[in-house]
Image (tube, grey):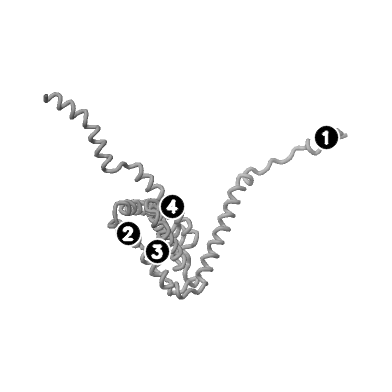
Amino acid sequence: MTDPRTTHADTPRPLQNTRDSAAGPGRLLGAVFGDLRAVDGALYAAVAATPTPTLDRTLRHLSHAADHSKISFAIAAALALAGKRPRKAALAGVGAIAVASASANLLGKRLVRRARPDREAARVTVDRHVKMPTSASFPSGHTASAVAFATAVGVVLPPAAVPLGALASAVGYSRVHTGVHYPGDVAAGAVLGIASAAAALAAAAATPSARTQALLTAARSWPRIGIAGALCR
């Protein structure tokens, strides 16, 4: 005869599969990344399928001119000849490019190793083609360097912020338009560029100027000079 006080709550239940519960967040994160990759690919395909014969040649030339930050270095050279503050902005911009390039090429691309888009499968018109890089696709190094330069120069020289920002945006889009990057690569490159500019500006602010260094050197040597002078007397 069963005990009338026994209820379903008292009956032992099998333990939940801890492996499944632990894998839940990982599975969810994988699903989110899968959706983001799908959106990224759809945006890439939409750009490739949109006819823009007027823009194709211009954006192809812009993308090629941005190789090795040639545009940014040319602007930095012009700024260096324009006065003290533009020269300071140019130095900040070049420093930001160095940080962004190293971060994108030595860290980002080696860690993620995302394959380049299949330009032929997406049917990107030949009029847009630039040389397909052999490096990984994520993040966009062109975008990182262009945004880093624009951000650093714009902080030091505010009137240059809008035109350089527009130029950096055009460089980033040109990499998608020519078929060598996904939009997500460009977005990541832009974030990396802003962070690189912030790091370069912080490093520059922490480094005392040449005049300050000279004053500090003189101050440190002053007691020795005073003692030596007293001994000579």
* CA distance for labels 3 and 4: 23 Å
Q: Which residue is mark 2?
A: 73
Which residue is at the front of the view, 227 or 7? 227
Given the image, on which type of amino acid does mark 3 rest?
A: Pro
* CA distance for labels 4 and 1: 65 Å
Residue 133, numbered label: 3
Q: Quadrant of the N terminus?
A: top right
In primary-sequence order, the first of circles 3 and 1 is 1
The answer to whether the residues at label 4 and label 1 have Cβ atoms under 8 Å apart is: no
Q: Which residue is mark 1?
A: 6
What residue sits 44% from the left and 66% below the top?
Answer: 174
Given the image, on which type of amino acid does mark 1 rest?
A: Thr
What residue sits 35% from the left and 41% below the top?
Answer: 206
Pointer 1: residues within 10 angstroms few (<14), some, or many (20+)?
few
Q: Secondary structure at mark 3?
A: loop
Q: Which residue is mark 4?
A: 194
Q: Nearer the viewer, mark 1 or mark 2?
A: 2
In primary-sequence order, the first of circles 4 and 1 is 1
